[in-house]
Amino acid sequence: MLSNRHIHEELEQAEKVRENLDSDYEKAMLKMAILNIKLQHNIRTNMTTIMKFFKIPLVEPEDKEKETK
């Protein structure tokens, strides 16, 4: 699972790429992809809030750095 920090970093990079594009079509398609990711992230956040409200246990993200040590 991607962390919030990673999602935001990737979205910032995509926005920078979008600014340098010449084609209006490519800009529009990339913008729609960015909006789709933001919407999915918002849905994930809302689901987590609902799960916390109903006291449903959340799966803790695995820390890959700990596994390699």
Image (cartoon, rainbow, N blue to C red):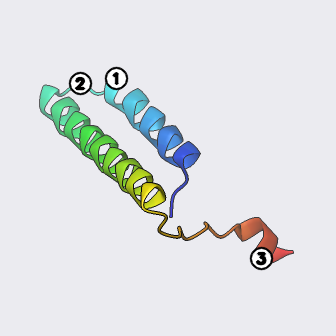
Q: Amino acid under label 1?
A: Glu
Q: Secondary structure beneath disc 2?
A: loop
Disc 3 vs disc 1: which is toward the camera? 3
The residue beneath circle 2 is 22
On screen, 69 above or below 17?
Answer: below
User: For the residues marked 3 and 1, what is the alpha-carbon distance in whole angstroms?
Assistant: 38 Å
User: What residue is drawn where x is 32% and y is 30%?
Assistant: 18
Q: Amino acid under label 3?
A: Glu
Query: What is the crowding at mark 3: few (fewer than 14 residues within 10 Å), some, or many (at least 20)?
Result: few
The residue beneath circle 1 is 19
The residue beneath circle 3 is 67
Q: Nearer the viewer, residue 8 or 55?
A: 55
N-terminal of the pair, mark 3 or mark 2, is: 2
Q: How many marks?
A: 3
Q: Is residue 65 left or right of residue 42?
A: right
Name the quadrant containing residue 24. Answer: top left
Q: Are marks 1 and 2 in contact (CB under 8 Å)?
A: no
Q: Which mark, by number, is residue 46? A: none
On screen, 28 above or below 19?
Answer: below
